Amino acid sequence: MVAEERVRRAVDRYMEAWSEGNRQQLLDVFAEDGEMTDPVGTQPLVGRKAIGEFWDFAHQDGEKTITHRSERIVVCANEALLEFVIEVRLPNNSGLDLRAFNHFVVNEEDRIQSLRAFWDESCMTQPEGMDLFVPDMG
Amino acid sequence: MVAEERVRRAVDRYMEAWSEGNRQQLLDVFAEDGEMTDPVGTQPLVGRKAIGEFWDFAHQDGEKTITHRSERIVVCANEALLEFVIEVRLPNNSGLDLRAFNHFVVNEEDRIQSLRAFWDESCMTQPEGMDLFVPDMG
């Protein structure tokens, strides 16, 4: 069992990696064989290589900024449920806010063993005073 | 794969069972071998008999009302993430609001195969104008 503070720290490091654009930190916070499913219902990405490719895909448009803002976290044993907002911003005054949930399972080495994201169309809103950015889902 | 509307209906029936005090409906919405973990980190209750005992424990004080109010639901494939508030009220003007998350997995017969609840002390608040009710956690 990992302690509550260690679970919180893993989630904080994950969020910080996105907000600071730190790819290496994102990979480091996952276990070697960690899994990421985003959103739930799609194929899990297994291992750091696959997770790194997901990062690269999200950042393929270099002009985009992607900020993860935490709203609320509940920690139960070695798991966490996070409510958060992804703020996507483009220099042409367009953007997208995605209010989503992440479920984390943290292992005994303080790394994320599993991340599963819950979001659907109802989670997407247009930031005030901006045009709506519609992401290319590939 | 169950369709989105069927997942929503299972969650609605679960919430309605609590709000209407309908024990039979609660048991019926679970699979025979359904599992309930409340909160995550405690031992899962497996099967309708164990879930019925949980219901009875929650209702042992007959003067208490327990309302489940849905705040937001996100459905992904055959899973749902629900943000909700449990409003516990006692006739002596005491109460408790618990703002929690439930993760549901719904099977192909539209029944709940797994329910896992995420809440901790940070989720508990004292309703305005009432004394705080502190539940007997057994």
Image (cartoon, coloured by chain):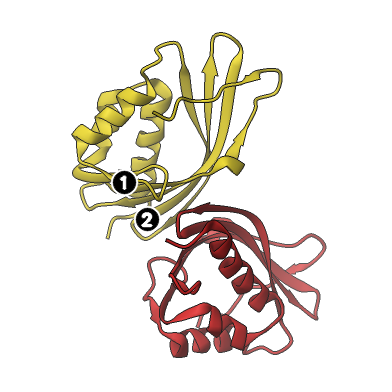
Chain colours: A yellow, B red
Q: Position of residue B56 (x, y in %)?
A: 57, 89
Q: Quadrant of residue B47?
A: bottom left
Please state which of the two labelled residues, at mark 1 or mark 2, is closer to the viewer: 1
Residue at x 59%, y 82% (from the top left corner): B58
Vertical comparison of A87 with A60: above or below: below
The reply, left or right, for residue A11 in relation to residue B67 is left
> Which residue is under mark 2?
A79
* Disc 1, SS: loop
Residue at x 31%, y 23% (from the top left corner): A56
> Which residue is under mark 1?
A43
Vertical comparison of A49 with B31: above or below: above
Q: Position of residue A4 (x, y in %)?
A: 37, 53
Checking the image for residue B5, the label placed there is none
Using the numbered discs, state the Cα–Cα distance from disc 1 to disc 2 in whole angstroms.
Answer: 21 Å
Residue at x 27%, y 46% (from the top left corner): A35
Q: Quadrant of residue A131?
A: top right
Q: Position of residue B101 (x, y in %)?
A: 54, 59
Q: Nearer the viewer, residue A24 or B74?
A: B74
Q: Which tag, 1 or 2, sits closer to the chain's start?
A: 1
Quarter containing the N terminus of chain B: bottom left
Q: Position of residue B75 (x, y in %)?
A: 53, 54
Q: Nearer the viewer, residue A52 or A107?
A: A52
Which subunit holds the residue at mark 2? A
Q: Is residue A111 visible?
A: no
